[in-house]
Image (spheres, coloured by chain):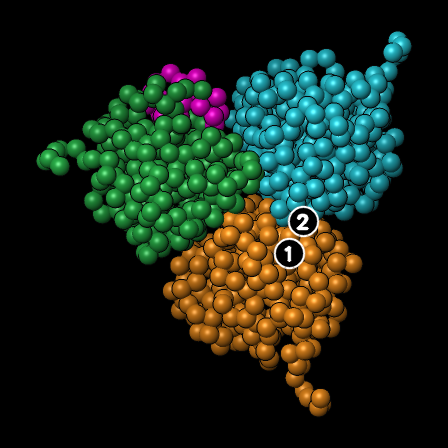
Chain colours: A green, B cyan, C orange
């Protein structure tokens, strides 16, 4: 093995294993402002990691709780009027108190309220932005043909936008797809774990945003490595769960079971990252 | 086979098969304003059909999205104040842009806010109204003893009300029960597929409303046939799922799995329509 | 068997069996104002008991429905502005019309909006207050280190607070934990049924609040015995469900299946109460 500037694949896999174990021992408190469609699944995903989720999304409480928690997720999926206020409170509080937070700009592009709010939230410096290709292109100012919450764009088409967005806002950007693209603007990593049923289970992407927050909550060295670690563990669990499911319905409980018992050996054996 | 004015049972079964396959190939974008209790299950039901669900329910976005989507569902189960505005936006937009939409008047009758709004929404000409017997009787102006979201009335008691409502508003009315009654005011069809556990799984009826919207999204000839097709496919999947479940809990993932893999043979073999 | 002032263990177990059967035959209408994270699971838990759940949580309807229902649950988990109004409506209506109701003060202590509202709601005399140790200590005026929705306090630490709270407000207080403490201020009962996975499934405690409401809805002699009965049945079902699950994901459908088919023999054989 020779000296080199860039981390190796094995670095990311080993980092994923150590971060995963850190979450399970530290049990970080994760604050989620997320859409009502996926709150239940998101909370159960976090609980399976041994994190402690709290869906505190009302004005006067969201800002207070963002300071109190180890990390926050702000997901724009169903921005009821009170949430339109509380997302600002929470993002400002997370920034002010040095807490990591993840922005998931669900469905931005064609939808006016969330598109404006997503751009406003960027000014509070999210630690990570996660979305599908259409959402990331739209957030980076590109011309997306985004159709609501499902992406019509390929992940590869979004790569340059993701890199620009990450460099410009000093954040980590993750584009979800069959092959996930994760970049801090300097280095770009590709994770190809996962299963097609994830796109047929509502909230798979949204819960990944909360999952990333748990990894950032315990991270000490590299936000990029933490986000890559989250994608590895999530994707490996999805693959192993699909292998013992009959379809996207039975996949959901199997995914939670698999996450709950995911161990070092499975991560090391199945991780696909480069 | 002789010439006849009325469609035969085999017409409805064949139509169900062809519409089901059309949804799976066209993957329509389905807009849902629905209650927070059932959003997750509803989205997963739509995804199992290969439709693309989007739960866009806030003012300024709901109307825009109703134009953009192939069909909309408006369900009145949990009408938070913002939804009380957005349902009007969405219904007006769907009507203005010629998009099919389904009205599900959950729990109307005794509850004042939703009862008023349901009647207002009728003026935007829903393509289909789906409810239980109490809700349909209440919407048609009858004296329902409706008890919240579960019906105390028999489906047969609601048939005449359903026919009047359909004829008066030029819509298709579907009354859910052990035997579903579906009418356009001229013809009345009876579907008896389904399983008793559907009444013990929250959102079975609400998700059916979204499921109907997917069928209307790809329909080209007969709204009545599309709504009948939805009931056939939904009920057959429920029966097949119950056959491999241990109770109403395991029925839920089994139902999603069964929908995901439902094929022509199963529809043809098990459809019960007359 | 000798005469005695205090009920015996067998009294509580027999009472649990008879109340369970009463719910299944009377099918009470249970009104829930609860948080959006757990509405779906809560409704399915109630349906598995054969109760009829209705999540009516908007102003102008919540008060009306609290009168109409057999019992209500008021859970403060996600208090959107409209719910901040409707919880007062519902509690006032339940009190005025003599309907039993359960208060679940989720996450009070550090969070300002819900902490204030929980104390206000106490003035409407809840029939039962259910929470974790941190929440009960905070409601009783103690100095809780409560961290959001998970308790950092032991149940035993909360016992004296629970007894004071029950005596002062003439209610039954239930503290959830590995061993549940249930008290009316005069007598204190301990239930140790349940499984550790309940703490890894979001809404296990919240749904228990609704479950208690179903028991109070049919109770005629002792609110304390009704709340104890709910804990016995819920905990026994959890234990039996865990025995046939692979992890907290598959536990959820198994728990619903087990509740649905829970019978006298299982309650009698597995109840742990003293």
Residue B224: x %, y % from top left: 76, 20
Q: Quadrant of the N terminus of chain C?
A: bottom right
Is residue B90 positioned above or below A82 on the image? above
Disc 2: which residue: B247
Q: Which residue lies furthest to the top in this view?
A: B3
Q: Which residue is drawn at 47% across and 41% down?
A: A241
Q: Range of the magenta residues?
A: A134-151
In the rendered structure, the residue with mark 2 lies on which chain? B
Q: In this view, does B39 lie to the left or right of A3?
A: right
In the rendered structure, the residue with mark 1 lies on which chain? C
- Quadrant housing residue B46: top right
Q: Residue at x 33, y 41 (%)?
A: A269
Question: Of helix, strand and loop, which one carries label 1?
Answer: helix
Residue A75: x %, y % from top left: 42, 37
Question: Of helix, strand and loop, which one carries label 2?
Answer: loop
- CA separation in Å, label 1 and label 2: 8 Å
Is residue B238 positioned above or below C15 on the image? above
Residue B228: x %, y % from top left: 75, 25
Front-lying residue, B36 or C190: C190
Decide whether residue B109 is among the magenta residues.
no
Do pointers 1 and 2 mark residues of a single chain?
no
User: Disc 1 vs disc 2: Cβ atoms closer than 8 Å?
Assistant: yes
Q: Is residue C103 visible?
A: no
Q: In which quarter of the image is the C terminus of chain C?
A: bottom right
Q: Which residue is drawn at 84% across and 40% down?
A: B154
Is residue A185 positioned above or below B19 on the image? below
Label at residue C258: 1
Front-lying residue, A102 or C177: C177
Q: Is residue C106 visible?
A: yes
Q: In this view, does B111 lie to the left or right of C45?
A: right
Q: Residue at x 56, y 68 (%)?
A: C193
């Amino acid at each position: 093995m020779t000296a080199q500037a860039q981390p190796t694949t094995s670095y990311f896999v080993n980092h994923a294993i150590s971060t995963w174990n850190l979450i399970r021992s530290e049990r970080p408190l994760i604050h989620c402002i997320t859409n009502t469609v996926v709150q239940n699944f998101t909370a159960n995903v976090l609980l399976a990691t041994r994190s402690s989720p709290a869906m505190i999304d009302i004005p006067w409480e969201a800002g207070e709780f963002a300071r109190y928690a180890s990390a926050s997720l702000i997901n724009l999926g169903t921005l009821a009027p009170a949430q339109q206020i509380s997302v600002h409170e929470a993002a400002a509080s997370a920034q002010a108190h040095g807490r990591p937070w993840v922005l998931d700009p669900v469905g931005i592009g064609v939808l006016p309220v969330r598109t404006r709010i997503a751009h406003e939230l960027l000014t509070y410096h999210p630690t990570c932005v996660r979305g599908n290709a259409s959402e990331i292109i739209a957030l980076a100012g590109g011309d997306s043909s985004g159709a609501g919450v499902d992406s019509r764009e390929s992940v590869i088409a979004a790569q340059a936008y993701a890199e620009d967005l990450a460099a410009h806002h000093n954040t980590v950007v993750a584009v979800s797809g069959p092959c996930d693209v994760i970049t801090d603007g300097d280095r770009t990593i590709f994770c190809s774990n996962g299963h097609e049923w994830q796109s047929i289970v509502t909230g798979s992407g949204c819960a990944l945003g909360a999952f990333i927050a748990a990894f950032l909550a315990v991270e000490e060295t590299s936000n990029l490595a933490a986000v890559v670690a989250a994608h590895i563990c999530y994707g490996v669990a999805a693959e192993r769960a699909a292998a013992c499911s009959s379809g996207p319905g039975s996949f959901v409980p199997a995914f939670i079971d698999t996450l709950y018992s995911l161990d070092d050996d499975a991560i090391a054996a199945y991780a696909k990252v480069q």
